[in-house]
Amino acid sequence: MAQATTGDTSLASIGDSEFDRDTTVVPRSGVTGVYDAELSAGWTIIRAVNGGYLLAILGRALADALPHPDPFSITAHYLTASRPGPAVVRTDVARTGRTLSTGQASLFQTAEDGTEVERIRVVASYGDLDALPDDARTSAVPPAIPPYEHCFGPQDGPAPVPGSSAITDRLALRLDPSTCGWALGKPSGKGEMRAWFGLADGRDHDPLSLLLAVDALPPTAFELGLSGWVPTVELTVHVRRRPAPGPLRVSITTRNLAGGFLEEDAEVWDSEDRLVAQSRQLARALLG
């Protein structure tokens, strides 16, 4: 079983943490399936609001709109860059069944000229993770990451990438030293990134924070020798289990960068060595 000590003695709880407050959606009075939200500047990186944080907001809205509580599979297409400030989430129930329900959601913001702009569109299937059987037949193994205290946090690196790095203050993120060559100007050339992952206020993880975890590490493009913003085009997350208390381990790999696009495959493991989430995203690599 994996062990890590973050040193945090004042722990927030699920439902009462900065992450929960910043992903709050408020049902609009008299309108079914419409929610108001406020995108916090605290979850920005370089010049955009983090895609995993945005996915958690839409995931929370769908958890309220659908009869089942947990995202099993959720796919997001990122249409335009979101900015901190007010947003509206509109949901639609496509199907409800005994064990699964499916819906879609879109997040909108108002542009400077007063027009409404769609930022993200999501399709998701929800169920009840607590109702799943315990059997697991897998060839997957947890990533080999050094102990937490032997890994590197943002404070250990050189000057940050230009732009906002506000999200790093909200995360307890420790990178595997073997995937940190980019921070020293010596990228390995391997499309790999591995880290211990938690929330800075000590909140334990739930299915919604898993949607953040798959997209919160530095991009694998950094270890391929690129720098700058790597905007997500599409992100699909499969939530496999409700995570046990404690820090997560996240492993992300890229095998192919071609035509200015790359894929990132992520695995998220909990403190009981269980694979709790998987994802794949397509992202643009800004080569210029």
Image (cartoon, rainbow, N blue to C red):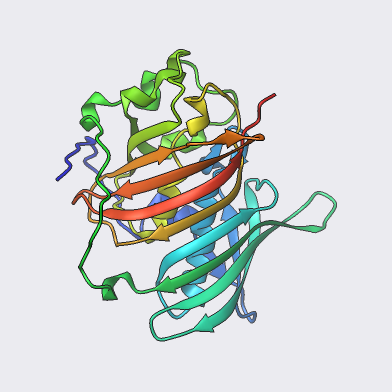
Where is residue 254? Give x, y as percent: 47, 37
Where is residue 284? Give x, y as percent: 63, 38
The quadrant of the rendering that contains the C terminus is: top right
The quadrant of the rendering that contains the N terminus is: top left
The residue most toward the right is: 113
Q: Is residue 35 visible?
A: no
Residue at 42%, 50% (x, y): give it: 18
* Residue 68 falls left or right of residue 164: left
Where is residue 10? Give x, y as percent: 25, 44
The answer to whether 103 is drawn above or below residue 15 in the figure is below
The answer to whether 169 is drawn above or below residue 16 in the figure is above
Task: Say which of 194 and 112 sits in front.
Answer: 194
* Residue 201 falls left or right of residue 121: left
Residue at 24%, 46% (x, y): give it: 141
Task: Say which of 156 and 21 sits in front.
Answer: 156
Residue 87 sits in which quadrant? bottom right
The residue most toward the bottom is: 98
Q: Is residue 138 visible?
A: yes
The answer to whether 61 is drawn above or below residue 141 in the figure is below
Task: Say which of 127 and 47 sits in front.
Answer: 127
Task: Say which of 47 and 30 sits in front.
Answer: 47
Where is residue 32? Give x, y as percent: 61, 80
Residue at 20%, 31% (x, y): give it: 147
* Residue 58 falls left or right of residue 193: right
Residue at 45%, 31% (x, y): give it: 191
The residue most toward the top is: 185
* Residue 210 falls left or right of residue 62: left
Number of numbered discs visible in the structure rendering: 0
The answer to whether 242 is drawn above or below residue 195 in the figure is below
